[in-house]
Image (tube, rainbow, N blue to C red):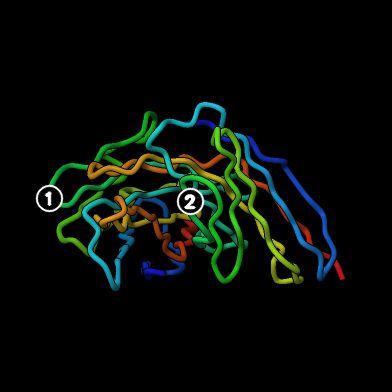
């Protein structure tokens, strides 16, 4: 399957600082990427949909000014947690949409990155 | 987006076949069914995807009845390393791209 990477894998920062997380599709182009957040022993929660060259679409309850998303190329989306606070500590996971048109129909599969563990002190 | 329902947990022993069934009664005509596996502190890993009937790959099989209101993930001869959370998701395929909404998943525990 296709590979999606995230960087960094772990980050510890002080309260009030900003943290940038990168998501890359390594062997395919992704016009659409998604950002999720996962708290311990819970399922993934969708935060936003990131489309290349346009503004991200945020889910209800997710502050767009706090979680800045940039999707400047077909292989890179970034999530910046601004003025991070301890309650932002979580596991952040991105996914990239691999969409292909085929003779037998369209094929779409989402591949996930390995995740980024954020700890805000 | 179609809502899915799966068992919260399942237990199995090494070498057994495990079948996890997912209900998606409101699945739409152009929705596909995708299963993911997740280990602690890792991103979900794609297992298998299908639209109807049966799909098989090197790690699993996916059975989808004609009405598509449910699907069954079959893992042949599980091992301890198959202990993980398994998610069933449905999503539409189109050029706009639709996010996958995760349910609680099924926690599979494999014992020796």
Q: Is residue A15 above or below residue A8?
A: above
Q: Secondary structure at mark 2?
A: strand
* Camera-nearest residue between B99 and A70: B99
Q: Is residue B18 above or below residue B96?
A: below
Going by the image, does A21 lie left or right of B80? left
Question: Is residue A121 visible from the viewing direction of this image?
Answer: no
* Camera-nearest residue between A98 and B77: B77
Q: Which quadrant of the figure has residue A96?
A: bottom left
Of badges 1 and 2, nearer the viewer stands: 2
Q: Quadrant of the N terminus of chain A?
A: bottom left
Residue at 15% from the left image edge and 57% from the top image edge: A72
Question: Is residue A57 visible from the viewing direction of this image?
Answer: yes
Disc sitting over residue B50 in the figure? 2
Residue at 43% from the left image edge and 30% from the top image edge: B28
Q: Are marks 1 and 2 in contact (CB under 8 Å)?
A: no
How dense is the environment of label 2, judged by Cα within 10 Å: few (below 14), some, or many (20 and up)? many
Disc sitting over residue A53 in the figure? 1
Q: Position of residue B34 (x, y in %)?
A: 49, 50
Residue at 55% from the left image edge and 37% from the top image edge: B66
Q: Which quadrant of the figure has residue B76?
A: bottom right
């Amino acid at each position: 399957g296709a590979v999606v990477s995230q960087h960094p894998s772990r980050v510890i920062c002080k309260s009030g600082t900003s943290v940038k997380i990168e998501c890359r599709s390594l062997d395919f182009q992704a016009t659409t990427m998604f950002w999720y957040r996962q708290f311990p022993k819970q399922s993934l929660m969708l935060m936003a949909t990131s489309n290349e060259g346009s503004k991200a679409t945020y889910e209800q309850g997710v502050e767009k000014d706090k979680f800045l998303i940039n999707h400047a190329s077909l292989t890179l989306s970034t999530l910046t947690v601004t003025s991070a606070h301890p309650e932002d500590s979580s596991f952040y996971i991105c996914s990239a949409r691999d969409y292909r048109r085929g003779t037998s129909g369209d094929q779409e599969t989402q591949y996930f990155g390995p995740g980024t563990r954020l700890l805000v002190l | 987006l179609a809502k899915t329902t799966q068992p919260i947990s399942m237990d199995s022993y090494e070498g057994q076949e495990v079948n996890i069934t997912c209900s998606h009664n409101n699945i739409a005509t152009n929705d596909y069914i995708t299963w993911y596996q997740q280990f602690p502190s890792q991103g979900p890993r794609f297992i298998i995807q299908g639209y109807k009937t049966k799909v098989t790959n090197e790690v699993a099989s996916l059975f989808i009845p004609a009405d598509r209101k449910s699907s069954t993930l079959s893992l042949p001869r599980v091992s301890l390393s198959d202990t993980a959370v398994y998610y069933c998701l449905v999503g539409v395929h189109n050029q706009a791209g639709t996010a996958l909404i995760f349910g609680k998943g099924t926690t599979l525990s494999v014992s020796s």
